[in-house]
Image (cartoon, helix red, strand yellow):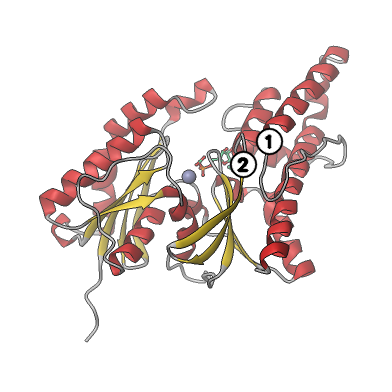
Amino acid sequence: MTEKPLYILAIESSCDDTAAALLQNEKVLSNVVARQAVHEEYGGVVPELASRAHQQNIVPVIDVALKKAGVERTQLSAVAFTQGPGLMGSLLVGSSFAKSMAMALQVPLIAVNHMQAHILAHFIDEEGYDKPTFPFLAMTISGGHTQIVKVNDYFDMEVIGETTDDAVGEAFDKSAKILGLPYPGGPLIDKYAKEGNPKAFAFTKPKVPGLDFSFSGLKTQILYFIQKNVAENPDFVAQNRNDICASIQYTIIKILMEKLKMAVAETGIKQVAIGGGVSANSGIRTALQEAEKKYGWKSYIPKFEYTTDNAAMIGIVGYHKYKKQMFNDSAVASKARIAL
Ligand code: KG4
Ligand code: ZN
């Protein structure tokens, strides 16, 4: 007899995206994200505006996720939601909604760690996608995170390296801002870098011990470099945009790859999975392909919609927690900071 499938409704609201997804076991039936454009003019996420926008978006986003999946509320097996880390005012919107819904439907409530979810996103069923096997290394790189994690099992993970200041996505976005590019500037740096010379300008890499990262020094270095050159030639940025972007990207990717190489050497694990918005970067993708050829690594990059902040990744954790009966009661508290 085949087992009845599980239908998990997942809600993600840790930062500036309101997201809901419906999973049938490990398969995604719908994955809906309402991005908040309100932050663009501020050059970064404004927490107070984010929580207000979540309140406006959450009901329609969940409705659309259910409709797209063709699943009725009464069919739901559980409701999973992001417990943290994230912005408290944003997290509370998703958690309150998830709690009321689970209570009303009398189904289990499952609290999910957002960082675990970025990693377990690799286990979503997707045609043609080879899932990693344990143990593997996961590098989560986004506007909010920069971590290297040794993943021994679904719920046995160890952070072996992380940023001591800015996240790598912030390094991209802040550099872009210095160049006068709009927020978020990461994808634009990537775009212009393709037309530029990565060795045109040399930036020094920060010296950070072990597997940890630091990006704030690089940002300051870029700022002084631009200020100095613009003082001599007001058109410096316009005349050298592609070369500047290529040189910045080259330096950032070099920092990431050097730490990954160290992590592989230290652990002996050659399976490397990346996630988070910065995994869309063409430089990191090329670098990983080269490492596959040169060092025999196997790299994993999930579909873009599962790698930026989304609720499908919360749903896959919900599924694996359900299988282990890892449920929460409605007293479970949202947490701005939370360990893996
Ligand atoms: O995962 P994400 O959508 O949200 C979180 O920050 O959690 O990641 C967004 C970040 C931004 O910093 C954005 O500039 C960066 O990912 N990003 C990129 C690229 N696409 C997105 N950075 C560099 N190159 C890209 N192609
Ligand atoms: Zn995230």
CB of mark 2 within 8 Å of CB of mark 1? yes
Identify residue for label 2. Answer: 163
In percent of width and height, residue 311 lies at 37, 50
For the question of whether residue 334 can be seen, the reply is yes
The relative height of residue 13 versus residue 119 in the rendered view (above or below) is above
Q: Residue furthest bottom?
A: 1
Inspect the image, locate mark 1, and give the three-letter code of the amino acid beneath it: Phe
Q: Earlier in the sequence, mark 2 or mark 1?
A: 2
Q: Is residue 40 left or right of residue 148?
A: left
- Which quadrant holds residue 207? top right
Dot 2: within a 10 Å radius of its alpha carbon, few (fewer than 14), some, or many (20 or more) residues? some
In percent of width and height, residue 253 lies at 72, 47
Frontmost residue, 316 versus 303: 316
Frontmost residue, 160 versus 13: 160
Q: CA distance from mark 2 to mark 1?
A: 8 Å
Residue visible at 22% across and 58% down in the picture? 78
In percent of width and height, residue 321 lies at 32, 63
In percent of width and height, residue 147 lies at 58, 49
The relative height of residue 220 versus residue 193 in the rendered view (above or below) is above
Identify residue for label 1. Answer: 215
Residue visible at 69% across and 68% down in the picture? 297
Inspect the image, locate mark 2, and give the three-letter code of the amino acid beneath it: Thr
For the question of whether residue 60 can be seen, the reply is no
Q: Is residue 101 left or right of residue 261?
A: left
Frontmost residue, 48 versus 183: 48
The kind of secondary structure element at disc 2 is loop
